[in-house]
Image (spheres, helix red, strand yellow):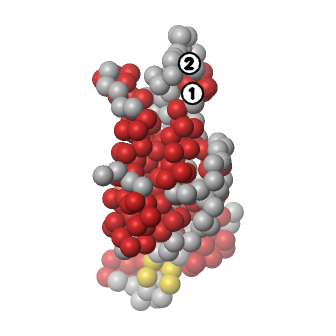
Amino acid sequence: MVFKSWKSICSPWFGGGFNIKDLPSWNRALLVKWIALLIAPASGLWAKWQQVYVLKGTDIWRLQAKDSFSTSLKGILAVRDLLVDSAGSIQNAQALLKSWVHGSHFHLQLAYDFFRAAPTQGGWTKGLSYSSIFPSHRITCSMAAQSQLATQDNIKKKGLQFANRCSFCKASEEDCNTPRLVWSSILSWMSLPQFSSSLSHLLVACPFGSSRNNWKVHCYYTSLAAAVNQLWWERNQRIFCHKTTDAAGLLCNIKRLVLARLYIKFPQSLFSSLLDHSVP
């Protein structure tokens, strides 16, 4: 069970989504590209044929759809109308289309982003954009920050009544102290002062800044995402598989995951201090 709409799932990472391709929006962007080809000064064979035998001197922006038109041309005109409506006028649509064309190259991603119209979330999404974070951890952490994981507390909010108990401490999941203990151990591992807050705040509270070339920044965000994912995995293992890993085991797993990512991106000598306090 996932408490997330398909539109939200197709949003980019900075919009709190999973950056899954939104096929309807992608198709609209491709159709707009055909409009750009039709009005380009150096038209190809297809565009020239359309201009002579279909448009017959009529401006593509004012061409009226006919039943005799092909399915592809009808789709182009439908997207043209959608673009004009979204831009507010033909002039604005023309200016918008022009901004997507650089030289002879049409920037499909710009058109796609326009039709997708992804909402911009808070600054916490930037914390999940670091390349060292496992993609699966990024998804879990993003959903946790937006309270979209199918926790027992969230399921209960949907109207299902049952006595929910945390798989870690047997109290309410919202009152569970296990995540704070794990996070405290991670901060000690990174030689950081103890601090705690909501997950969305932790995603913007990196004490090392935001440089993408600083291994400590990558370590912080990768550790945070790995901890959230590991806790969620352990919770599900206890509920559905009746398997248990103690706090020390969880911390060892998190360290291994983080170091594996740092090995790929940075020289080992940079984070030797972490290796001294890591697992054997």
**First along the sequence among labels 1 and 2:** 2
Kindly identify the residue that appears in the image at 30 percent across and 52 percent down: 280
Q: Residue furthest top?
A: 162
Residue 71 vs 177, above or below: the answer is below
Q: Nearer the viewer, residue 268 or 39?
A: 268
**Picture quarter with the N terminus:** top left
Q: Residue furthest right?
A: 88
The location of residue 46, given as percent across then percent down, is 33, 77
Task: Give me the disc on residue 176.
Answer: 1
The location of residue 250, given as percent across then percent down, is 40, 39
The location of residue 202, given as percent across then percent down, is 62, 50
Whether residues under marks 1 and 2 lie with C-beta atoms below 8 angstroms apart, the answer is: yes
- In what element is the residue under mark 1? loop
Neighbours of disc 2 within 10 Å: few (<14), some (14-19), many (20+): few
Kindly identify the residue that appears in the image at 36 percent across and 45 percent down: 253
Determine the image quadrant of residue 90.
bottom right
Kindly identify the residue that appears in the image at 59 percent across and 53 percent down: 203
Asked if residue 104 shows in the view, the reply is yes
Q: CA distance from mark 1 to mark 2?
A: 6 Å
Neighbours of disc 1 within 10 Å: few (<14), some (14-19), many (20+): some
Task: Give me the disc on residue 185.
Answer: none
Q: Amino acid at mark 1?
A: Cys
- In what element is the residue under mark 2? loop
Kindly identify the residue that appears in the image at 57 percent across and 27 percent down: 176
Q: Nearer the viewer, residue 61 or 7?
A: 7
Q: Which residue is mark 2?
A: 171
The location of residue 198, given as percent across then percent down, is 64, 42
